[in-house]
Structure formats: structure tokens, C-alpha cells
Image (tube, grey):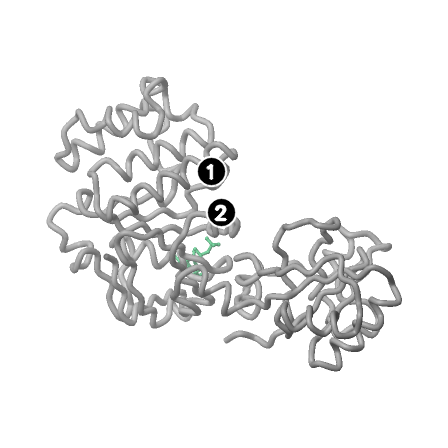
Amino acid sequence: MIEAVGLTKSYGDKTAVQDLTFRVQPGKVTGFLGPNGAGKSTTMRMVLGLDQPTGGSVTVAGRPYRELPNPPRTVGALLDAGAKHGGRSARNHLLSLAQLSGIPASRVDEVLELVGLTAVAGKRSGGFSLGMGQRLGIAAALLGDPRVLLFDEPVNGLDPEGIRWVRDLMKRLAAEGRTVFVSSHLMSEMALTADHLIVIGRGRLMADMPVQEFILQNSTSFARVRTADVGQRDALTSLLTGAGAQVFPEEAGTLKVVGLELPQVSDIAFEAGVRLWELSPHHASLEEAYMRMTQGAVDFRAGGAQQASVAGPAAHGSGGPPGSPLPPGAGHPPQQPYGGAQPQSFVQPQENAR
Ligand SMILES: Nc1ncnc2c1ncn2[C@@H]1O[C@H](COP(=O)(O)OP(=O)(O)OP(=O)(O)O)[C@@H](O)[C@H]1O
């Protein structure tokens, strides 16, 4: 387990991490999320004793990293996959790390096999592709067979096969009862990999909960409705609005209905004699929930002028149609063809979550 209590780190007058308290539990993959500059790497560096907190504390398996009897056998980490001696072969790189920690040389071949680098073990790691470098970094993290693992952006630059391999590895490590703490900006990947999330923004804790709960708490589900014809669609729109729903017409001719359960929508349509061709539930993705939660905690955002020049003068705002309650920026999700079952979400305008 990793436990942070009031963890704080300041660089001069810049506070990178502020009063963070959380536990990373064994047996789960815990995703560590936050916008650029939120303090994720700083936190991980403090877990690993590479930076000293200016306040609070963080322990691994009950002790600060520097007090662990044999740190590489307790905690392994991939922080910077580029941090290797490029002139050495993959095997020699791992052998030197093993020697430093009193790990038997036989373990080097085991981890090379585990990450799929056996065939290139004798090659200079300087010539490795990004994906091979990531695998070598992961091999180094696994060398001491530690119970606690930290990975900072482990899928950075990996191809789909590599991403899937990392995902399966994380899940396997967690299933073995290890503590797996992994940062990533790839939300779709985190949704598939993580069981639990710790989200920070501007150095502060914003969420600490299971992935599904995070999505539920930070998103709005909606129903998509398709009627047999336009006249019925307009009639149904007024009835649903009258019943307290927010109704948004979509380009594909469907309606997005927020605020009523599916059976209620069905009953209202039935009682009015409106024939429905589609009535489907839609849930938010992790990415949508994350964007909604962190929108007030982003340090770096592309400026409007920049976006305009990229989009070209003909581009229109991404808000709702004139008269719609959607503000600019709260655009409709991509339309699905009729019957398309991809879950989508309407992200409602929300005040700064903090
Ligand atoms: N050595 C340092 N000296 C001064 N400021 C630092 C130092 N290290 C980090 N910071 C600042 O602390 C803040 C948090 O940085 P950190 O790298 O931990 O964020 P992050 O969440 O890992 O970001 P990213 O997702 O971009 O990697 C940033 O504002 C950063 O500029």
C-alpha cells in the first residue's frame, strides 16, 4: 500500500502538491489522473524518495522510501523510460541494476522474457524504439519482484499492441495482489485498465473513488429518442419539456433527453400516441466525466485565437444551436447512425468543480 498524509511540496513560492491525503490499495490498478502540471510526477517522485516533501509524509508498505530495508524489492517504478545507459545492451543495463540491489542475475532473463525483449537482449538499448524502451523500463521496475509498482505514463508512444500488453500486465500484477499506481492522460485506456482513480488538479486532491462511481458522479446520462416522423418529434419535445426534461434536437433527427428515466419517456410517448423508433440509454465515458471535473483545474489550454486559426474562418462554435441552452464549448457528442449503440454523453454546463 502507498499512503500519503497531508503530502505537500513547494518549489520556492510554487506549490506543486498541496495537502494530499490518499491510500493506494493492493489488488487494484489505481489510475492517477490530472491535467498537465497537476503534480502527478512530483507526487510519484516523493513516493520514491527522489524528492523530499516540504510537508506531510508518504509511505510505501508502512515506511518512507528511504527507510525501506531493500527498496527495489518493495517498490518498482517506471518514471522516465529514457533514463538508461544507451551504450549498454538491455541485458547489461538490467544486470547492473540487479547487482546494485543484490538481485540474482537469473532474474534478469526472467524479466526480459516477461516483457518480450529476450530476442533483443544483447542489443544496445540506445537503438531501441520508444516501445522497446518502455518495455525495458518496465522490466527494470519488475526486477526486484516488488509488491508495489508505480508507472508514470507507461503507454506513452506505444502502438495498440503495446498498449494492450501494458494493460494486461497492469491487471495481472494487480490480480497477484500487488499495489499498482499508474498515471496516464489516455482516458479511454484508463477506463479499461483502472479499478480506482485518484484525481488531482493544481496539486490538490479532487477525487478518490472507483472508476464507475467517478463516471456516475461527474456525468449526466441521457436517453436518445427517435420518432417515426418530424411532427411527432415536435409534439413529443413539448410533452417531455412539460414533464421537466431538457430536450436537445440532434442533427440525425433524434432527440437527446436529459432528466427523465427511460420508462417515463416511454410512458409519455405511449400516452400521446407517439410511435418511437428508438429509445436508448446513454452513459458518459470516463473522458467526459474527467473533462467535466477538471475543467476548472487546467493550467494550460490552447487559446481561442490559436484554435480559430487551426479551425479556419468557416468553423463555427461548438455550442448548441441558436436558442439552445448549450453554451459554447458544451457541444453535442458525435452523432451515431440510427441504431448506433456507442454510449455517448451530453456534458452539461457546470461551474468550476473546485
Ligand atoms: N524541480 C522543479 N522546480 C520548480 N517547479 C517544479 C519542479 N518540478 C515540478 N515543478 C512544477 O510543479 C508543478 C507540478 O509538476 P508535475 O511535473 O508534478 O506535474 P504533472 O501532473 O506530472 O504534469 P504532466 O502531466 O505535464 O507530466 C508544475 O507547475 C511544475 O512546473
Mark 2, other Cα within 10 Å: few <14 / some 14–19 / many ≥20: some
Of the numbered discs 2 and 1, the one sitting upstream in the chain is 1
Q: Amino acid at mark 1?
A: Ile
Where residue 337 appears, x then y in whole percent?
Answer: 74, 49
Q: Residue tagged by mark 2? A: 189
Residue 316 lies, in percent from the top left, at 82, 60
From what the image shows, is residue 286 above or below residue 204? above
Q: Position of residue 142 (x, y in %)?
A: 26, 38
| Disc 2, SS | helix
- Residue at the spot x=57%, y=75% of the render? 352
Q: Label 1: state its secondary structure.
A: helix
Is 229 situated above or below 169?
Answer: below
The tally of labels here is: 2
Question: Cβ(mark 1) to ligand 1 < 8 Å?
Answer: no
Quadrant housing the N terminus: bottom left
The residue under the point 38% across, 58% down is: 196
Please say if the residues under marks 2 and 1 sit with CB atoms less than 8 Å apart: yes
The residue labelled by disc 1 is 163
Q: Nearer the viewer, residue 209 or 225?
A: 225
